[in-house]
Amino acid sequence: MPLLKPSITWLRDPGNPILAPDPASEIDNCSCMNPFVIRVDDEYRLFYSGGSDKRTYQRICLATSTIDDPLCFERRGVVLDIGLPGSFNSRWCVLPYVKRFGSKWHLYYSGMDDQRRGLPSFRGIGLALSNDGLHFEPLSIEPIITGDQTPDFPHNKGIAGGGLILEDTLPDGRVLYRMYYTITNGTGNLDLSLPDDLKRTAHEKHCAVCHSFDGIEWFDHRIILSPRLEVPNEDIGVAAPYVWRDGSTCRMLYCGIGTRWYYYSISEAVSADGYIWDRGNAGENIALAPNEAAAWESQSVAYPCVIDDGGKKRLFYCGNDNGGTGIGTAAEL
């Protein structure tokens, strides 16, 4: 199924960013990043990572709005704090993803430790549980997924989550869950003065998928998307896959970083099975590019999340500095 152009034209909201860092806040005065939005009854819940103390710490936070005023979000504070010193999430908890499994809400998140090693310090995806979807407790002090589980990169350390979980009903009636995530196998030290080949070494990323029957034990990890060296907006890395079903087709919005901008843009891919993806020809699948006319997103747009909003799709995403300027939205035109 050839992808000739993105399936949706996105109209940015003139009120962007809709959730910006609050200088008066103790929890998100430096960044609002990694939006993940769900609807629960008549409420939208926007989970995000809030940064404080010059982004020394990032915690999972919540903001809510009503369906009558969906873009007016009220901050509700921290729902998951950082871990103990020495733990995999001792400095950052980022990239929230929330899904209900039976009577329990699962909050998946990515942790950064205090070793300051760049991308390898993102060394696990953790899980926290809740009865009401508002108050979460970690299942374990250890991550449930690590970055060394794909056959392609058995010695890799870095990993980042945040992607959607799809469900497949097997012939025996069991539900198989698919989680999409990012392998961060670069060093993370992106110096714009470096030659292009060293930039790739510094910020290389791949998109992956894994599987589970209970949302806790995950297996069968596979790489499903890698950088394309011939495409300048994604020749360094691809990351943050957000996958949803559109009838019999799987669609993905993902972030590409490359030598064209050296920052993130958002592109689209399409698949019949969610494993083999078509991105079209170079440059034709860019869904949302940096906007030089808007200071908050002039360099970068990243970390897409898509919801249904009144029969059309709505996109939430980060602006410059991975949320340093806040979270914005765009509507399906």
Image (cartoon, rainbow, N blue to C red):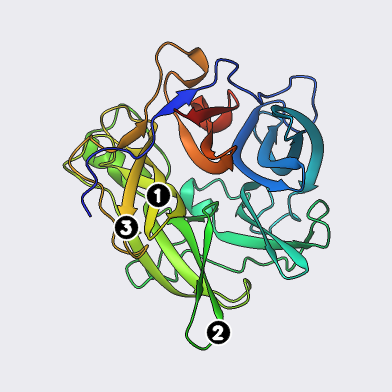
Q: Secondary structure at mark 2?
A: loop
Q: CA distance from mark 3 to mark 1?
A: 8 Å
Residue at horizontal 47 percent and vertical 13 percent from the top: 294
Q: CA distance from mark 2 to mark 1?
A: 27 Å
- Residue 138, given in percent of the width and then of the height, sits at 76, 62
Q: Which residue is mark 3?
A: 271
- Residue 156, given in percent of the width and then of the height, sits at 41, 63
Q: Secondary structure at mark 1?
A: strand
Q: Quadrant of residue 153?
A: bottom left
Residue type beneath disc 2: Gly
Mark closest to the chain's N terminus, 3 or 2: 2
**Quick check: marks 2 and 1 in contact, CB under 8 Å?**
no
Q: Which residue is mark 2?
A: 173
**Quick check: marks 3 and 1 in contact, CB under 8 Å?**
yes
Q: Which quadrant: the C terminus? A: top left
Relative horizontal placement of residue 114, taking residue 11 as reference (left or right): right
Which callout, 3 or 2, points to the residue nearer the camera? 2
Q: Looking at the image, which is closer to me, 18 or 172?
A: 172
* Neighbour tally class for label 2: few under 14, some 14-19, many 20 plus, Cα within 10 Å: few
Q: Which residue is mark 1?
A: 252
**Residue lying furthest bottom in this view?**
172
> Is residue 317 visible from the viewing direction of this image?
yes
Residue type beneath disc 1: Met
| Above or below for 321 versus 77 | above
**Residue lying furthest top in this view?**
293
Q: Which quadrant: the N terminus? A: bottom left
| Above or below for 210 versus 279 | below
